[in-house]
Image (cartoon, rainbow, N blue to C red):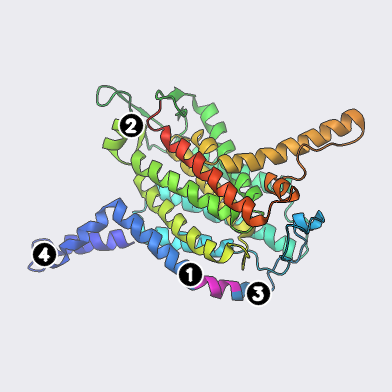
């Protein structure tokens, strides 16, 4: 909106006596300027709206009255404060600020619009899940099969749309010497390998669906300690802020030999808005948390990260950049799989971890909540550095 408005003013003022007075508006053509504006706007909006949203959620009694998983396990040594009663659905704050800020600062294009649509749908799914838990319509919220069904339908729609949509990306193999056009799903880039993988439409669509569904649920599983999920999301958002900016710049993409995706630069504004909104939310979500994001926020943020990775041909890079999310998800998969296998074989189910997701395992081992969160932050930064290093180490 700001971009459109400033460009309209520049066009109207052209060849007039006051053209020089508004010439500074040319700054808004730069993605870096609008990204900085989006980050600051989202952060300030979150700080301003945060107390109001928290108070509103309290009045509606949208608090966590169900027992926390670690509390339920009986390990009170590392749980000094009871979290029951803390407002949840704080993801409404993140999603609301993120969408408004992006619409305000970004130059609208199908990539941005598709990302915002994904955020809204997953936030709606998460909201219904949180609401079902709070109102005790269902002890576990939305049944897992229903949640997965909605996620797969959404991801399938996105994948088919990206295959059908006529937009193309340009890959420069060796500078300007060779270039080839590809659609947004059939060609993949592998970390530490500079040549494209022509996977084909079927594989591309399948991988797109799995990436969005996996990333959405992985962030959701990470959301179990104060500040953990949003802090790791912030770090990953910075990685994709860099990657989207490079993918949307023809010269930088050619130099680094990564696919140039027309319009991907505007996703940098989205990532900046997510960083600003996330920082503002972390202000209230750090230990001891005043509000939780709930599934409303975690499903939406995770899905958006997965989609952005797909849009710039880097779904495998999410496995590295989102290493903490991958750890959390696979700890649950391994725990359940091993428990079912050993129960089938011996009649008694056994566990690999003291508790899953893995952040609760370390709590059971005696780590304080703040220790777990800070050490996972450190791991997330290391994963982020490795992910960014793949741009040159190939």
Q: Position of residue 220 (x, y in %)?
A: 63, 50
Which label belongs to residue 256? 2
Q: Earlier in the sequence, mark 2 or mark 4?
A: 4
Q: Position of residue 61 (x, y in %)?
A: 69, 73
> Residue at 50% across / 72% down in the picture?
49
| Mark 1: few/some/many CA within 10 Å (<14, 14-19, 20+) | some
Q: Earlier in the sequence, mark 3 or mark 1?
A: 1
Mark 1 vs mark 4: in front? 1
Judged from the image, the secondary structure of the residue bearing numbered disc 4 is helix
Find out whether the residues at labels 2 and 4 contact each other: C-beta distance under 8 Å. no
Look at the image and give the residue range highlighted in magenta: 49-54
Q: Position of residue 150 (x, y in %)?
A: 64, 47
Q: What's the distance in space between the residues labelled 1 and 2, CA to CA?
A: 38 Å
Q: What's the distance in space between the residues labelled 3 and 1, CA to CA?
A: 17 Å
Quadrant containing the N terminus in the rendered view: bottom left
Mark 3 vs mark 1: in front? 1
Q: What's the distance in space between the residues labelled 4 and 3, CA to CA?
A: 51 Å
Find out whether the residues at labels 4 and 3 contact each other: C-beta distance under 8 Å. no
Q: Is residue 108 above or below residue 319?
A: below
Q: Earlier in the sequence, mark 2 or mark 3?
A: 3
Residue nearer the viewer, 337 or 74? 74
Mark 4 vs mark 3: in front? 3
> Residue at 75% across / 55% down in the picture?
70
Judged from the image, the secondary structure of the residue bearing numbered disc 3 is helix
Quadrant containing the C terminus in the rendered view: top left
Find out whether the residues at labels 1 and 4 contact each other: C-beta distance under 8 Å. no
In the rendered structure, the answer to whether residue 206 lies left or right of residue 70 reads left
Which residue in the protein does label 4 denote?
20
Judged from the image, the secondary structure of the residue bearing numbered disc 1 is helix
Which residue in the protein does label 3 denote?
58
Which residue in the protein does label 1 denote?
47
């Amino acid at each position: 909106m700001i971009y459109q408005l400033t460009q309209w003013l520049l066009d109207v003022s052209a060849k007039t006596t006051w053209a020089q007075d508004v010439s500074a508006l040319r700054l808004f053509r730069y993605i870096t300027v609008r990204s900085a504006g989006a980050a600051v706007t989202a952060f300030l909006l979150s700080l301003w709206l945060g107390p109001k949203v928290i108070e509103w959620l309290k009045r509606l009694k949208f608090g966590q009255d169900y027992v926390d998983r670690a509390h339920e396990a009986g390990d009170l040594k590392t749980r000094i404060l009871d979290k029951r009663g803390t407002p949840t659905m704080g993801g409404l704050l993140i999603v609301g600020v993120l969408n408004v800020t992006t619409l305000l600062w970004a130059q609208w294009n199908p990539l941005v619009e598709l990302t915002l649509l994904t955020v809204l749908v997953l936030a709606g799914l998460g909201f219904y899940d949180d609401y079902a838990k709070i109102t005790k319509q269902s002890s576990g919220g939305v049944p897992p099969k229903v949640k997965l069904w909605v996620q797969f339908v959404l991801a399938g729609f996105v994948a088919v749309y990206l295959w059908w949509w006529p937009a193309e990306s340009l890959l420069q193999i060796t500078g300007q010497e060779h270039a080839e056009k590809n659609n947004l799903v059939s060609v993949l880039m592998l970390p530490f390998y500079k040549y494209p993988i022509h996977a084909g439409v079927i594989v591309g669509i399948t991988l797109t669906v799995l990436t969005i569904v996996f990333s959405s649920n992985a962030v959701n599983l990470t959301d179990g300690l104060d500040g953990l999920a949003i802090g790791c999301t912030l770090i990953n958002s910075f990685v994709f802020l860099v990657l989207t900016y490079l993918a949307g710049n023809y010269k930088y993409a050619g130099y680094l030999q990564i696919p140039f995706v027309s319009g991907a630069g505007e996703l940098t504004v989205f990532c900046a808005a997510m960083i600003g909104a996330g920082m503002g939310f972390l202000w209230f979500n750090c230990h001891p948390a005043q509000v939780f994001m709930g599934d409303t926020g975690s499903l939406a943020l995770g899905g958006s990260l997965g989609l952005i990775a797909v849009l710039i041909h880097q779904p495998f890079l999410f496995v590295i950049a989102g290493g903490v999310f991958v750890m959390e998800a696979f700890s649950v998969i391994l725990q359940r799989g091993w428990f079912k296998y050993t129960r089938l074989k011996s009649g008694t189910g056994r566990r690999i971890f003291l508790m899953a997701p893995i952040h609760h395992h370390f709590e059971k081992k005696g780590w304080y909540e703040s220790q777990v969160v800070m050490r996972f932050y450190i791991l997330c930064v290391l994963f982020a550095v490795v992910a960014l290093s793949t741009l040159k180490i190939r």
